[in-house]
Amino acid sequence: MRLLVLVSVVIVMFAVALSLSSAGQPGWNAQMSVYNENGEPVSLNVTTRPILLFAEWCPHCRAVLPLVAALPPDKRPVLVDTYYNGPPPTSKIESELMTAGMGGQPFYTVPSPPSSVSGVPVLISVRDGGAVIVSGEAGVKDWVRTTDIVRQKDPIIRSCETAENIR
């Protein structure tokens, strides 16, 4: 299972590398154009904070949101809802965030994700000057689980890690 996750992360990173290039080189754009809760266009800088692209209707996204909620608010990625037609489904987004334990959490929307993204959930961050893209439920869960704060705080994650070590 971990091999499958690793292979999918490598494939996505390669695809993004083709479209983004490396930081500081032509083609790199660490900005993402989105809309705030009032529908006003804003630009997010992925070098400042990771971005989590999700869809309020996506069961895989719903599965990762409670883990993201376990992070302290200042350590959570910026939330961006995507893959919708028409006006943003603001009330549905707010409802999903409330269910996940992030009621009142600021979020952004964008009708379609960047062309290098082909599904959700996807976490976009920057490490060592280059884009890092973590794709899929398992990949995003692994990213969250590597955060020591969550590992120490969440007894479910600790029990899962203990069970994995026993096998």
Image (cartoon, rainbow, N blue to C red):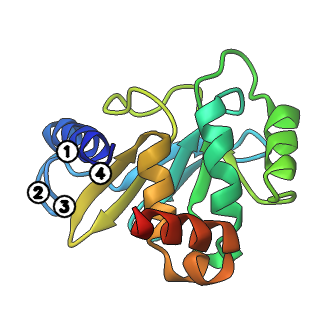
Residue 109 seen: no
Q: Secondary structure under badge 1?
A: helix
Mark 1 and mark 4 lie on one chain; the one further toward the N terminus is 1
Mark 2 → mark 1, Cα distance in angstroms: 21 Å
Above or below, comparing residue 56 to residue 141 in the picture: above
Q: Where is residue 21 in the image (x, y as percent from the top left)?
A: 14, 48
Q: Badge 3, how many Cα within 10 Å: few under 14, some, many 20+? A: some
Q: Mark 2 points at which residue?
A: 25
Q: Mark 3 vs mark 1: which is more N-terminal?
A: 1
Residue contact between numbered discs 3 and 2, judged by CB atoms under 8 Å: yes
Residue 96 rendering spot, x and y as whole percentages: 80, 41
Q: Name the residue under label 1.
A: 10
In this rendered view, identify the residue nearer to me: 167 or 146. Answer: 167
The quarter of the displayed image where residue 114 is located: top left
Query: Where is residue 143 shown, x and y percent of the image?
Result: 44, 61
Mark 4 lies on residue: 29
Callout 2, which amino acid?
Answer: Gln
Task: Please name the amino acid that badge 3 sits on.
Answer: Ala
Give 87 or 134, whichever is nearer the viewer.
134
Give the residue at mark 3. Answer: 23
Instruction: Answer whether labels 3 and 1 touch (C-beta < 8 Å).
Output: no
